[in-house]
């Protein structure tokens, strides 16, 4: 997650035993973790692990956690200097509020929930905890929470404000899916949290200039619009033909704002409105505007505008304007080469905008929150300033979005419509729907449903009875198209719900998406969706299991969320086939994740395929059901896995293996295999080879060519790749065509654990064509492979 390791995440995430809950980077420490697992204790030690943001120059953190069979836990420290961390234990999942304690001072109390001590180098706002506190008193009725503080606490070092995306199930604008809502206390709706920093940093006038951003012309409302836009922007770019990994439309190094030299048409998200003064002008380009709107390209990426409504723009490459991350600024003249950009080029890189503008959410709800010192209240001037921002933002946002979207900033109770923000219905069919409130109605609550386009039929009026929280009804698809549907409560303290309903003329526009599948002892869940990933209720799905498996029921109808659940008892390895009733080519296959199986004699040297293991060698396991998150345990100790497929795992045998036998077990999401007893020898040399041709992995030194690509000549130095030569091997002997070859080098191959390299000279006097090549180490022979000589 992109938000900090804070008390809020400590209490709301997974259950935690946290000796030092902060963002560490073990990858750059020489020996970062050490584990002792014994009958009387389990100890994990972090050895010299730096904080992630300080890697390379910070003090190393060394600490330890000890777990004992009687349940008690010890934390121990030897040189911890992290500026920010949480220490303690938590059951997670927001089960209860934390008790803040001093571990140094100690306590005789007994605690039933999270116990933590918070260490901080400076004051900061814990936005996760702030959101949790908000939801203790307010409904889950907001897409954005907007936090200001009255304590002069900066949002973060070097930033006026920032946004954290909490939920995203959309695609086609360069961002990734995320579902962190429950951590923030939102079970349904929250999409983003904005930390706007101290209220004192902004002028009282919502349209006054912010001093720290004076050159850009930013105001309190434009900065708020900037952070609001970060739910969608700016993460999309065309590709650079000379550097496929580059994103030239974005500023580096954050790749979350438009490049200064991109004609963003004065987007809030960076870049500028740039005038091209003609190829003969010097300088050719001039910035003429900044931070004043969501530009047409922005609106396409936000889902507000169709691609055909976005005119081409341009990027100035090889710009003399300087750093791509330079803040927007009108009046800057510069030179470079113009590269025209069409929206189709952007979509070709980030994919189709899903959902598209026909059904994407257009109405967003905001809650504005002021954080004040504990035990105090906000003064009237602070509240008036914040309320001016709140009231001014609604028309400002609508204008910035070209009247294609709205912001609602009123504090309201929630109306949870099952089809929010969009849902699908088939023409001529009915779909189940419901409206839910969070607390039982004190008196009957009357709801009015309005449809604007005649595409959907729904009851004009509904009522949630006193003492109830829910009312169910049906949507009927009248004709193909998109309906704008609103649900309004007679009680004005409830929000108004806006939803778009897509009516499809035929099931052929639907498909199935696997939500959960193949897990042992768990149902298979699929969702009926269209090209926009809208759910479709009341659609029949058929199921059939092949082989010896069984599935119940044989057919089921999707619920309000488009979900269908089947109980599958595979009984073997056969797949489950699901399809939409009466729709050709709609079938999907779900494979069972069964317990892994190791074949008899299925643990072998990865080069020679000889059964058995040697210390430090690259080995293979052959079997079935091996691919899903595999772990390989050798006598209970984890081995490093290089590669996994359903039928094969390649791993590094531990260097500590002793001759005799070892128990090999594979553990996956599907279960644990039976233990396979495998012989272990100190040395088991194996040469890597092509199984089809029998030709060894032998290269002609200095050419990068194998003997299959260019036969070797007498006197050529050959590179032979092998494994299983032992942890402290004697030099290998090489025989080619029955003749002993001169060995130039025998030892580890650089860059890959377990791989050995032997350099040998091709002897004189051998006939051209295929010749046998063999290694031996301390008298132990390898497999025989072929090389080609000329």
Image (spheres, rainbow, N blue to C red):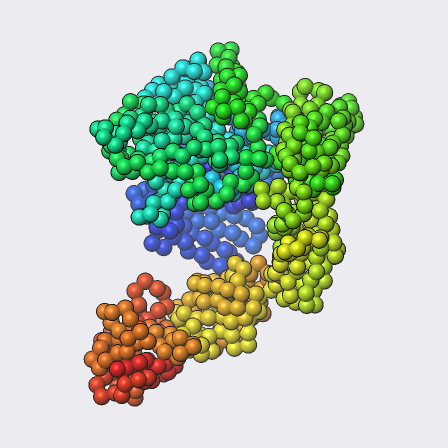
Q: Which residue is located at x 30 percent, y 29 percent?
A: 276
Residue at left 22%, top 82%?
714
Residue 435: image quadrant is top right
Give the image location of residue 513, x and y in percent: 61, 50
**At 49% from the left edge and 73% from the top edge, which residue is drawn?**
603
Q: Nearer the viewer, residue 785 or 103?
A: 785
Q: Find residue 544 and report its horizontal and vertical position in percent.
A: 70, 60
Answer with left or right where residue 575 lies relative to residue 11: right
* Front residue of 528 and 133: 528
Q: Which quadrant would residue 222 be assigned to in this image?
A: top left
Residue at the top extreme, as displayed: 380
* Residue 20, quarter of picture: top left
Residue depicted at 44% across the width and 79% down the height: 610
Question: Taking 531 as reference, is 287 left or right?
Answer: left
Vertical order, 765 against 1 (above or below)? below
Query: Residue 190 location in percent, x, y?
Result: 57, 33
Give the position of the C terminus as an image quadrant: bottom left
Task: From the viewer's perspective, tell me whether residue 456 is left or right of residue 48.
Answer: right
Of residues 286 and 652, the one drawn nearer to the viewer in this rendering: 286
Q: Is residue 133 left or right of residue 487?
A: left
Residue 413 percent across, percent down from the top left: 65, 25
Task: Answer whether residue 450 is visible to the viewer in this image.
Answer: yes
Q: Is residue 338 above or below residue 622?
A: above
Nearer to us in this view, 638 or 351: 351
Q: Is residue 755 above or below residue 295?
A: below
Q: Is residue 306 above or below residue 537?
A: above
Report the number of numbered marks.
Answer: 0
Residue 175 appearing in the image: no
């Amino acid at each position: 997650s992109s938000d900090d390791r804070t008390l809020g995440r400590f209490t709301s995430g997974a259950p935690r035993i946290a000796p030092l809950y902060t963002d560490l980077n073990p990858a750059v420490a020489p020996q970062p973790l050490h584990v002792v697992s014994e009958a009387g204790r389990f100890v994990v030690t972090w050895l010299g692990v730096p904080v992630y943001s300080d890697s390379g120059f910070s003090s190393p953190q060394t600490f330890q956690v000890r777990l004992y069979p009687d349940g008690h836990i010890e934390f121990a420290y030897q040189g911890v200097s992290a500026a920010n961390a949480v220490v303690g234990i938590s059951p997670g999942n927001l089960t209860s509020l934390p008790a803040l304690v001093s571990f140094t001072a100690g306590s005789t109390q007994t605690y039933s929930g999270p116990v933590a001590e918070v260490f901080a180098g400076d004051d900061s706002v814990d936005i996760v905890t702030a959101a949790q506190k908000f939801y203790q008193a307010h409904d889950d009725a907001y897409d954005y929470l907007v936090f200001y503080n009255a304590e002069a606490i900066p949002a973060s070092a070097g930033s006026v404000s920032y946004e954290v995306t909490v939920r995203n199930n959309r695609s086609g604008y360069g961002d990734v899916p995320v579902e962190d809502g429950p951590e923030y206390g939102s079970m349904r709706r929250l999409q983003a949290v904005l930390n706007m920093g101290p209220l004192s940093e902004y002028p009282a006038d919502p349209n006054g200039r912010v001093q720290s951003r004076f050159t850009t012309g930013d105001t309190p409302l434009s900065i708020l619009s900037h952070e609001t836009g970060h739910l969608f922007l700016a993460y999309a770019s065309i590709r650079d033909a000379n550097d496929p990994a580059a994103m030239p439309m974005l500023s580096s190094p954050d790749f979350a704002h438009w490049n200064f030299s991109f004609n963003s048409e004065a987007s809030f998200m960076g870049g500028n409105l740039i005038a091209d003064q003609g190829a003969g002008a010097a300088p050719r380009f001039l910035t003429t505007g900044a931070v004043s709107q969501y530009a047409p390209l922005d609106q396409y990426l936000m889902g507000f505008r169709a691609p055909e409504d976005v005119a081409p723009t341009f990027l100035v490459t090889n710009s003399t304007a300087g750093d791509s991350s330079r803040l927007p600024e009108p009046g800057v003249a510069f030179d470079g080469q113009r590269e025209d950009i069409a929206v189709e080029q952007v979509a070709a890189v980030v994919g189709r905008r899903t959902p598209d503008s026909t059904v994407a959410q257009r109405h967003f709800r905001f809650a504005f929150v002021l954080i004040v010192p504990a035990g105090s209240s906000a003064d009237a001037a602070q509240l008036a300033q914040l309320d001016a921002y709140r009231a001014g933002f609604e028309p400002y946002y609508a204008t910035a979005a070209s009247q294609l979207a709205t912001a609602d900033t009123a504090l309201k109770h929630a109306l949870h419509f099952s089809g929010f923000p969009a849902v699908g219905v088939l023409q001529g069919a009915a779909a189940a729907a419901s409206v839910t409130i969070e607390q039982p109605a004190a008196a009957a609550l009357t709801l009015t449903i309005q449809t604007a386009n005649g595409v959907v039929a729904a009851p004009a009026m509904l009522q949630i009875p006193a003492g109830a929280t829910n009312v169910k009804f049906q949507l009927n698809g009248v004709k193909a198209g998109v309906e704008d549907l609103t649900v309004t409560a007679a009680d004005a303290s409830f929000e108004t719900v806006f939803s778009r309903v897509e009516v499809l003329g035929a099931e052929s526009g639907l498909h199935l998406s696997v939500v959960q599948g193949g897990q042992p002892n768990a149902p298979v869940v699929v969702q009926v969706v269209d090209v926009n990933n809208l759910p479709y209720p009341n659609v029949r799905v058929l199921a059939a299991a092949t082989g010896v498996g069984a599935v119940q029921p044989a057919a089921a109808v999707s619920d309000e969320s488009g979900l269908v659940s089947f109980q599958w008892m595979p009984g073997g390895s056969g797949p489950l086939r699901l399809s939409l009733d009466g729709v050709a080519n709609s079938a999907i296959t779900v494979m069972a994740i069964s317990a892994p199986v190791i074949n008899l004699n299925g643990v072998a040297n990865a080069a020679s395929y000889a059964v058995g293991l040697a210390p430090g060698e690259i080995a293979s396991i052959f079997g079935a059901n091996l691919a899903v998150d595999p772990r390989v345990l050798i006598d209970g100790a984890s081995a490093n896995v290089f590669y996994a497929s359903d039928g094969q795992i390649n791993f590094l045998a531990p260097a500590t293996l002793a001759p005799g036998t070892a128990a090999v077990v594979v553990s996956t999401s599907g279960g644990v295999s039976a233990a396979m007893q495998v012989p272990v020898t100190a040395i088991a040399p194996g040469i890597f080879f092509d199984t089809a041709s029998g030709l060894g992995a032998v290269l002609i030194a200095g050419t990068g060519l194998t003997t299959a690509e260019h036969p070797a000549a007498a006197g050529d130095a050959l590179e032979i790749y092998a494994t299983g030569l032992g942890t402290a091997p004697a030099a290998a002997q090489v025989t080619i065509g029955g003749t002993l070859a001169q060995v130039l080098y025998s030892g580890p191959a650089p860059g890959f654990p377990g791989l050995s390299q032997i350099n040998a000279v091709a002897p004189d006097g051998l006939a051209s064509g295929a010749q046998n090549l063999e290694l031996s180490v301390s008298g132990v022979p390898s497999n025989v492979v072929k090389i080609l000589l000329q």
